[in-house]
Image: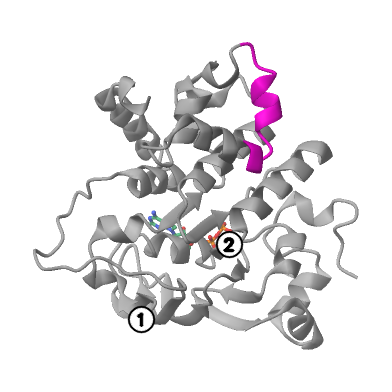
Amino acid sequence: VLLAYDPAKRLAKLQVQLERATTNARMLYEVLDTTPRQPDRADAPKLSVSDATVRFEDVTFGYSEEDTLKSVSFTAEGGKTTALVGPSGAGKTTIISLLPRFYDLRSGVITIDGQDIAGVTKSSLRAQIAYVTQRPYLFEGTIADNIRYGRPEAKDDEIIEAAKLSHAHDFIMAQPLGYETPIGEGGSSLSGGQQQRISIARAIIRQAPILLLDEATSALDAESESFVQKALEEAMRGRTVIVVAHRLSTVRNADKIVVMQDGTIAEEGTHDTLVADEDGLYAHLSRLQWLGGTEEQTTEGDQPE
Ligand code: ATP
């Protein structure tokens, strides 16, 4: 189980990731951290989730003096998928990182079902959020440990169920020790697509109503890609999803697309309404076959008309 893995060692390793300034590791570390470092107000209530609608209202935020997000307002409807697209550096990942309260806002409010997330306990907030980072973070331990990390109290049959949903069960069973197969630091013994499916199983087992997804930009071979895509569809089912989207298929299937530019929202709509505005940024990016600057945009069968 997770605790068999020396927590101090685990922290130390994650710390190294932090020092490498990999925001992903930082996020993962903090989302899964069950004891928030900054204590909540003594009287802070727990977040109470019904349909898990997320709303940004006039949110301004910066890492330094400069504002990275400027008066950002949008709604991610409960149970729907909202895709964030736009040029590199526009602030898409930053938006996602504000939801688990990794940082405090400069001004504005983020609410979940009408409750200001700044006013509820961090642990109750983070319990409602699963996060799939761009590059999966796998630690040294068994495959089962790595999946269970999403919800330490999960039972073995729940781990298997999550692995089946994320299309990981078959390749896990093909390993010498199945679920008890040790994987090296960083998951080096597994292919990129397999690592991603394990990280998706970890998100599924978390059973959180809100899924934050930072889509991978690195290209997988077509077969892995299709398995990962199916796994993501399972993870997204019935959840409120906010996805930093790099695949055109994700963008097209989203219920809402929010187009970011330079820390602000340039436009929002669906694929059809956005391409119809020929002068708009989305239509422009679409014509360039470039919505997130990734290789997938140019793979076969994934071209804009
Ligand atoms: P990409 O598609 O390249 O990931 P993005 O739209 O997600 O881009 P962000 O990662 O949100 O953009 O970055 C927005 C701005 O904030 C960039 O100028 C970036 O350099 C800066 N930034 C991001 N994370 C941090 C951080 N942890 N500390 C300081 N600055 C940061």
47 is higher (above) or lower (below) than 295: below
Secondary element type, mark 2: strand
Q: Is residue 224 magenta?
A: no
- Does the beta carbon at disc 2 come under 8 Å from ligand 1? no
Residue 33 image point, x, y percent: 30, 44
In the image, 135: left or right of 166?
Answer: left
Q: Residue at x 49, y 21 (%)?
A: 142
Q: Which residue carries the number 2 mark?
A: 243
Secondary element type, mark 1: loop
129 is higher (above) or lower (below) than 198: below
Q: Please say which color scheme the image uses.
A: one colour
Mark 1: which amino acid? Answer: Gly
What residue range appears in magenta?
164-176
Q: Which residue carries the number 1 mark?
A: 114
Looking at the rendered image, the quarter that the N terminus falls into is top left
Mark 2: which amino acid? Answer: Val
In the image, 243: left or right of 107?
Answer: right
**What distance separates the C-alpha of mark 1 from that of mark 2?**
21 Å
Residue 253 image point, x, y percent: 73, 67
